[in-house]
Amino acid sequence: LTIYYDPLALSLSDLRLKVEELLERLEAVPLPEPRLVTIPAVYGGEYGPDLPFVARHCSLTEEAVIRLHTRPTYHVYMLGFTAGYAYLGGMPKRLTTPRLPSPRLRVLAGTVGIGGNQTGVYPVESPGGWRLIGRTPLTLFDPTWEVPVLIRPGDQVKFVRITPDEFEARLGHGRREAT
């Protein structure tokens, strides 16, 4: 929540009183049940060029990184950075990996990355500084959809490993795989 106000027109103490008045009138709003969004992803190689770095950094094999990354069900903390970019929490601490010292200028849509102790999927082609470990064939953002994002705040996300052949066969097919 961000509150913009003019400190020349309203003192901080008056602002605090107004916010407290509003808080007293708030009613609880039930949140929708979280959806489970399954993200098929191919890992490593041209799809995840930083997988070897992540494995070395974490003192794991590439297979162990993939197993650890696909094990949890992640929670969508928020959307940001670009339209539809979901910050996913719940990644195993063992996979915590620093971001790049300087961002790449071009990361393809659908690329799965790790940045610090979070993971996420780039919904559109953009610059990015996270370590790239895989890629999904799903479209995650399309402004022509009624709800333009596949993943929403509060959703749960599960990554499922697929092969490069499955990736190529599914690329561009289908909008959603939410259950």
Image (tube, rainbow, N blue to C red):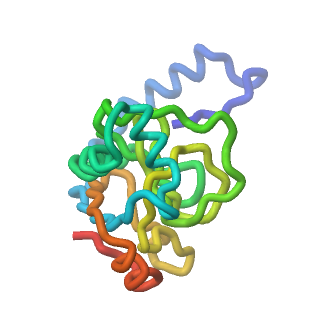
Where is 74 relative to 109, above or below? above
Residue for point 59% across, 19% down = 14
- Dividing the picture into quadrants, the one containing residue 57 is top left
Is 42 positioned to the left or the right of 16 in the image? Answer: left
Give the x, y percent position of residue 106: 67, 58
Residue 174 in view: no
- Farthest-out residue, top: 13
Tell which of 85 and 118 is nearer to you: 118
In the image, residue 38 above or below residue 53: below
User: Which residue appears at 27% of the width and 43% of the height?
Assistant: 28
Residue drawn 21% across the image and 70% down it = 179
The residue most toward the right is 8
User: How many numbered discs?
Assistant: 0
| Image location of residue 171, percent across then percent down | 44, 80
Can residue 119 be seen in the rendering of this structure? yes
**Position of residue 27 in the picture relative to residue 5 (left or right):** left
Q: Position of residue 20 (x, y in %)?
A: 44, 24
The foreground one among 80 and 42 is 42
Residue drawn at x 59%, y 55% is 82
Please state the horizontal and vertical placement of residue 160, each as a whole percent of the image: 26, 62
